[in-house]
């Protein structure tokens, strides 16, 4: 057991756990942040995506010992129902979620991508940004649209590339 | 007493096709569960946890086919932290399950027939201890010959996997005289098509909770597609009264048919009886899900088609062999649907169709979106294109010549009485930009060595159960203390958004805002038995069930208000969650006031309604349940680009033209057409679970490629609305047909691009490259 200190969604967290426990299990079991999902457990699907700093990573591939002093944002940190982010509202309005199990990981990846750009992304840019997130329900088209819609709302003066 | 209500059920309303007269139905309403899904706040059942929980694990068979000579659990039982270890000896009731034939043991006793088989169960304090305990269970096996091929399984040499032999079912439809027709034919096309073992690949793997409550009720929380049938199958294995079991089966993190059969419900129930009242959780890893979960039936389909010079198809002969793996599950229904749909939505006068559902040791196959039609649609659609090319006819024209209209006789010989939208979908296809300008699009490949092709295909899919399977819809509506209405429908939320449509229908019928509606699905203590969320039936069934029960709620509200206000009930109208005396609008009561009154009088505020889905009267003898009464229809136009150097193929554009009757929610419909198109692309180009000699070579998503966002083409949806008269709103079904015609359309588009026909799916780069080789013979050879 090791005491690990890090920041999650703006709050400092202290967790006592084996250092080899995955970040995903720490989030879900120790911090009860169940938005991040396990689907493949091998970094293939992106359902467990979280931000560490500015980087989007699969939390099933990161161990607790690696996150000491890191700053982590999960889907819950992007927004909850009472303070939804633009990208979350866009996903609802564009119909970009179906069964919803992959959605938290996609929201995190989309938010990180939107943070990194200052224009309305092209379809190809969205495809590159979300290429690591699998969805079996939607066919992805409405996800692409939702990210573009969120970019337009985020800054109405953005240029459409 | 009669109460005048604005009830959309009625002949004069059925003829209207515009959705304008509705406030909610037909509108592009966002999903009601959207906010909790995009924020991650929705607790799926596999997300839950309990303070005193234990972990359950399943020991799967080591061999695909073997005799069990001994099972010794002694060492596992004494491992510290182990709560219980269970084998077949611990099953109090019937050791079997299976929707059609209960031939799958809950826990194997004397033989294992595939590596999905369960041999023992463990519950332990931690997941790790449970895993370790599995290693300590000693099972002695005598390996037996593995039956790895369905056609071999049908021979006399093959070991018999079940007492009645390896052919579980044989279904057929004969109509007319094919031999005579083949003699009269101008052209005959004869080919064999192979289809892949597609995996559902729902993002949430199988899992859930079992817990024995203090009052003796056994609660099973487990994603599923039919809570009441899951409960029945659990009760049989446990020897319990179903009433003492509470099944919660919604929401699902995806299902697609793969959670239609029992997954882990019975394991959870058995472990919960032996965990000292502590809740038991099972959640399969992806690897275990790949090995243990149902897959789509791989088919071998031989098709012989006779055509005349004028483009009419006069005969079609089909022999389909389906590999159902070790157990039947819904295999017999899948092959029956395949036979029913093998000749397409056409009026071919002479047909001879037969299908076999065959046992092997290749895992287990069961229900999957499309249910046998995906596998058989490629034969007739490809042969229509071959005929069209031979006689120089347009591919859409040849389909119009052969497609039946409402009131005409189908290939399987029944008069189609329900709505038929094929011709309208083909008209839309003919006029869509991609088809009209296809010559120009084909001239613009992204690289000089790539070639583009455009093709069309059409198909159909039954809605609801065929003949011989009971098919009821049911719903209840309850007035809540806060004046809101709770609508409960059995059909689970598996991702499709059916619950949003239920809220739309309830709001429409009860004249209130959608935000005043709460929807409950898939819960045996909350919802009535209204059948499965399968067979493209949940929108048709749920909407009709709510429309059946809504007048009762209107009556309850109006009569109660009348009683309180001393006004005749016939004067009462409902607007904005208020009952108003239309003769004196100042005389009104809110739903809350009505609830208070009923509550004080100890009267029920809940109403229930059932209906029976319309059926055909006569079954086609030997067909296993054909025909259906209602079908959804669909045409796809696609453009592909094939890399002639590698065989790699991209689908660039898809036009989806569904006829699902009235569109209840356009956003939801597009969700289905887009998701279905992508799943169809995966089926045609990428997906196949590799099993060799009974062992899964595919383990996880690293070696099971399905479409990512990068493979998403531009998908356009152009719905045709041919209202179905037996649904109060004109709705039919959409969930499955959306992934069907795209399969042969992609195959024909590859041909259009390259001249190569691939008949073995998935059409991998290797297979396309091989098929292109004869075309490249005249090409200059590298000088290297």
Image: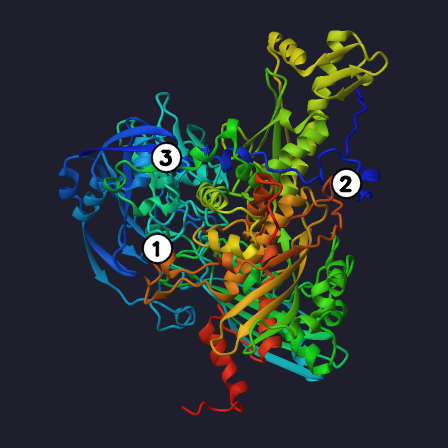
Give the side of residue B214 with respect to residue B13, left or right.
left
Image quarter hosting the C terminus of chain B: bottom left
Residue at 80 percent across and 41 percent down: it is B14
The chain to which mark 1 is attached is B
The chain to which mark 3 is attached is B
The figure's colour scheme reads rainbow
Residue at 27 percent across and 54 percent down: it is B61
- State whether residue B465 appears in this view: no
Give percent across and percent down for residue B205: 40, 46
Find disc 1 in the rendering and name its residue. B291
Residue at 51 percent across and 28 percent down: it is A83
Quadrant assignment, res A54 = top left
Give the side of residue B553 with respect to residue B242, left or right.
right
Q: Nearer the viewer, mark 2 or mark 1?
A: 2
Marked residue nearer the N-terminal end (2 or 1) = 2
Marked residue nearer the N-terminal end (2 or 3) = 2
Image quarter hosting the N terminus of chain B: top right
Give percent across and percent down for residue A142: 58, 48
Element under disc 1: helix
Q: How many angstroms separate mark 2 from mark 3 (CA)?
A: 43 Å
Element under disc 3: strand
Marked residue nearer the N-terminal end (1 or 3) = 3
Q: Nearer the viewer, mark 2 or mark 3?
A: 2
Q: How many angstroms separate mark 2 from mark 1 (CA)?
A: 46 Å
Find disc 3 in the rendering and name its residue. B209
Give percent across and percent down for residue B417: 75, 53
Q: Nearer the viewer, residue B292 or B253?
A: B253
Find disc 2 in the rendering and name its residue. B19
The answer to whether marks 2 and 1 mark residues whose Cβ atoms lie closer than 8 Å is no
Element under disc 2: loop
């Amino acid at each position: 057991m090791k005491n690990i200190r890090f920041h999650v969604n703006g709050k400092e967290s202290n967790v006592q756990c084996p250092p080899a426990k995955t970040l995903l299990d720490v989030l879900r079991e120790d911090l009860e942040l169940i938005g991040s999902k396990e689907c493949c457990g091998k970094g293939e699907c992106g359902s467990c995506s979280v931000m560490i700093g500015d980087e989007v990573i699969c939390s099933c591939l990161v161990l607790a010992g690696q996150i000491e002093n890191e700053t982590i944002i999960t889907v819950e940190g992007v927004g909850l129902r009472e303070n939804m982010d633009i990208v979350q509202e866009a996903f609802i309005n564009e119909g970009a979620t179906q069964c919803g199990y992959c959605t938290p990981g996609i929201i995190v990846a989309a938010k990180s991508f939107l943070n990194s750009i200052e224009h309305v992304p092209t379809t190809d840019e969205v495809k590159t940004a979300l290429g690591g997130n699998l969805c079996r329900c939607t066919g992805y088209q409405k996800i692409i649209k939702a990210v573009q819609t969120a970019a337009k709302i985020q800054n109405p003066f953005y240029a459409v590339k | 007493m009669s109460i005048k209500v604005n009830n959309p059920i009625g002949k004069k309303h059925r003829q209207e096709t515009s959705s304008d007269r509705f406030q909610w139905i037909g509108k592009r309403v966002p999903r009601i569960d959207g906010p909790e899904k995009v924020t991650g706040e929705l607790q799926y059942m596999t997300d839950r946890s309990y303070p005193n929980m234990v972990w359950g694990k399943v020991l799967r068979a080591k061999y695909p086919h073997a005799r069990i000579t001994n099972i010794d659990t002694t060492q596992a039982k004494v491992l510290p932290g182990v709560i219980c270890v269970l084998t077949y000896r611990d099953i109090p009731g019937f050791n079997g399950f299976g929707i059609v034939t209960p031939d799958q043991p809950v826990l194997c006793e004397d033989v294992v027939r595939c590596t999905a088989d369960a041999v023992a169960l463990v519950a332990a304090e931690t997941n790790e201890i449970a895993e370790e305990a599995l290693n300590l269970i000693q099972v002695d096996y005598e390996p037996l010959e593995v039956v790895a091929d369905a056609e071999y399984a049908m021979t006399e040499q093959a070991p018999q996997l079940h007492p009645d032999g390896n052919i579980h079912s044989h279904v057929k439809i004969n109509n007319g005289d094919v031999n005579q027709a083949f003699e009269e034919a101008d052209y005959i096309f004869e080919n064999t098509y192979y289809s892949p073992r597609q995996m559902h690949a729902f993002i949430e793997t199988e899992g859930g909770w079992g817990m024995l409550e203090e009052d003796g009720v056994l609660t099973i929380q487990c994603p599923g597609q039919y809570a009441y049938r899951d409960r029945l199958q659990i009760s049989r294995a446990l020897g319990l009264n179903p009433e003492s079991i509470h099944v919660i089966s919604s929401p699902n993190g995806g299902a697609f048919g793969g959670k239609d059969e029992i997954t882990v419900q019975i394991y959870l129930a058995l472990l919960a009886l032996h965990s000292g009242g502590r809740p038991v959780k099972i959640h399969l890893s992806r690897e275990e899900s790949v090995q243990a979960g149902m897959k789509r039936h791989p088919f071998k389909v031989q098709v012989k088609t006779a055509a005349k010079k004028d483009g009419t198809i006069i005969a079609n002969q089909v022999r389909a062999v389906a590999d159902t793996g070790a157990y039947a599950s819904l295999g017999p229904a899948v092959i029956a649907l395949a036979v029913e749909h093998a000749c397409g939505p056409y009026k071919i006068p002479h047909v001879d169709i037969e299908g076999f559902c065959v046992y092997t040791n290749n895992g287990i196959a069961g229900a999957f979106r499309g249910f046998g039609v995906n596998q058989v649609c490629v034969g007739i659609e490809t042969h229509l294109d071959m005929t069209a090319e031979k006689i120089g006819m347009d591919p859409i024209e040849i389909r119009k010549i052969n497609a039946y209209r409402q009131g005409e006789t189908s290939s399987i010989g029944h008069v189609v009485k329900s709505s038929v939208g094929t011709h309208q979908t083909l008209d839309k296809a003919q006029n869509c930009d991609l088809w009209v300008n296809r010559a120009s699009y084909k001239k613009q490949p992204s690289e000089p060595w790539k070639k583009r092709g455009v093709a069309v295909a059409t198909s159909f899919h039954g809605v609801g159960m065929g003949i011989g399977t009971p098919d009821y819809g049911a719903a209840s509506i309850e007035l809540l203390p806060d004046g809101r209405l709770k609508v409960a429908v059995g059909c689970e939320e598996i991702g499709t958004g059916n619950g949003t449509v239920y809220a739309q229908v309830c709001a429409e019928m009860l004249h209130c805002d959608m935000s005043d509606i709460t929807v409950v699905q898939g819960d045996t203590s909350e919802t009535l038995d209204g059948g499965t969320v399968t067979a493209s039936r949940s929108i048709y069934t749920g909407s009709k069930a709510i429309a059946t029960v809504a007048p009762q709620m209107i009556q309850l509200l109006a009569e109660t208000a009348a009683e309180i206000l001393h006004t005749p009930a016939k004067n009462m109208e409902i607007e904005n969650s208020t009952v108003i005396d239309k003769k004196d609008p100042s005389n009104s009561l809110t739903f809350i006031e009505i609830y208070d009154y009923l509550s004080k009088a100890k009267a029920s505020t809940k109403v229930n309604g059932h209906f029976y889905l319309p059926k055909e009267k006569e079954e086609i003898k030997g067909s296993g349940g054909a025909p259906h009464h209602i079908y959804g229809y669909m045409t796809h136009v696609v453009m592909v680009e094939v890399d002639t150097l590698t065989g790699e193929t991209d689908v660039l554009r898809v036009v989806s033209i569904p006829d699902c009757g009235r569109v209840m929610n356009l956003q939801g419909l597009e969700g289905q057409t887009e998701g279905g198109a992508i799943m169809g692309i995966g089926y045609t180009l990428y997906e196949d679970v590799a099993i060799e000699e009974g062992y899964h070579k595919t383990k996880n998503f690293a070696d099971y490629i399905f479409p990512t966002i990068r493979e998403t083409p531009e998908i356009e949806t152009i719905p045709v609305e041919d209202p179905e008269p037996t649904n109060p709103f004109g709705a039919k079904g959409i969930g499955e047909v959306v992934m069907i015609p795209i399969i042969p359309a992609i195959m024909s588009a590859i041909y259009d691009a390259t001249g190569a026909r691939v008949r073995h799916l998935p059409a991998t780069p290797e297979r396309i490259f091989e098929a292109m080789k004869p075309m490249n013979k005249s090409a200059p050879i590298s000088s290297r």
